[in-house]
Image (spheres, rainbow, N blue to C red):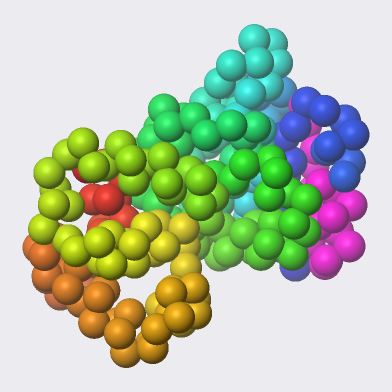
């Protein structure tokens, strides 16, 4: 059973998220309303050798309602690298997304709150992040793609390869990308291979090329 900590200052939304996750077999071990409480709660759980699998946190929380939530998540990622973090935001905030994704993209998610209403999609994102995957809202990816076009790292990619890389950044598998683009799995595999080649990501037993490609995409 996956163990979740929820950090959301709206009691109504926090209880709704708790009900949504527990109804689908996840265990919500704590719910808090500010960044300091989130830090303390996760630290106490870690001390008790009961570190949760994933945190679901609002970007903006008390006392200033600016960046307390994401700051706490970045701090906790540094302390507990295996901890999954899924942040929720009312709007696309590139700076906060960039800060969260500045390290490893493993076990990281950034969703707009509107996605929470799509229960299955939201729960799937929580499970994917808890398992070390990535879950990025399509609108977040679109904004990051617009920013990336100001750089020259990805200029060698074709429009289709950029599209495939953007879907990779959302955490989609090759099969899911094929369904989205209505192409064969083989076609997607060819695009992914071309992306690795053009970004200079050769085979290595120590590196995960898919993650490195996404990092290049986000940081470009």
For the point 33% across and 40% down, the residue is: 146
Taking the spot 25% from the left edge, 61% from the top edge, the residue there is 159
- Work out which quarter of the rendered image holds the N terminus and state it: bottom right
The relative height of residue 87 versus residue 162 in the rendered view (above or below) is above
Viewed as shown, does residue 1 lie left or right of 126?
A: right
Residue 219 position, x and y percent, is: 26, 42
Q: What segment carries the magenta color?
A: 17-33
Q: Quick check: is 152 in the magenta stretch?
A: no
- Is residue 124 visible to the viewer in this orientation of the structure? yes
Decide if residue 59 is on the left or right side of residue 29. left
Is any atom of residue 50 visible in this view? no
Residue 153, percent from left and from top: 14, 48
* Image quadrant occupied by the C terminus: top left
At which x and y percent is residue 37?
A: 71, 25
Look at the picture and state if 105 lies above or below 112: below
Quadrant of the image occupied by residue 183: bottom left
User: 189 or 205, which lies in front?
Assistant: 189
* 15 left or right, relative to 89: right
């Amino acid at each position: 059973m996956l163990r979740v900590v929820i950090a959301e200052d709206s009691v109504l939304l926090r209880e709704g998220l708790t009900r949504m996750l527990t109804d689908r077999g996840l265990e919500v071990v704590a719910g808090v309303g500010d960044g300091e409480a989130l830090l303390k709660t996760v630290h106490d759980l870690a001390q008790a050798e009961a570190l949760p699998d994933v945190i679901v946190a609002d970007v903006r929380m008390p006392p200033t309602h600016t960046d307390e939530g994401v700051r706490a998540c970045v701090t906790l990622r540094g302390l507990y690298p295996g901890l999954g973090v899924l942040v929720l935001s009312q709007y696309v905030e590139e700076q906060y997304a960039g800060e969260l994704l500045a390290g490893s993209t493993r076990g990281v998610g950034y969703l707009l709150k509107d996605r929470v209403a799509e229960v299955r999609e939201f729960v799937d994102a929580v499970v994917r992040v808890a398992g070390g995957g990535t879950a990025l809202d399509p609108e977040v990816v679109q904004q990051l793609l617009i920013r990336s076009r100001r750089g020259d790292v990805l200029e060698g990619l074709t429009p289709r390869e950029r599209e495939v890389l953007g879907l990779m950044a959302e955490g989609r598998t090759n099969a899911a990308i094929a369904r989205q683009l209505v192409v064969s799995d083989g076609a997607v595999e060819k695009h992914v291979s071309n992306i690795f080649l053009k970004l200079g990501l050769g085979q290595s037993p120590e590196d995960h090329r898919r993650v490195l490609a996404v990092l290049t995409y986000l940081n470009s």
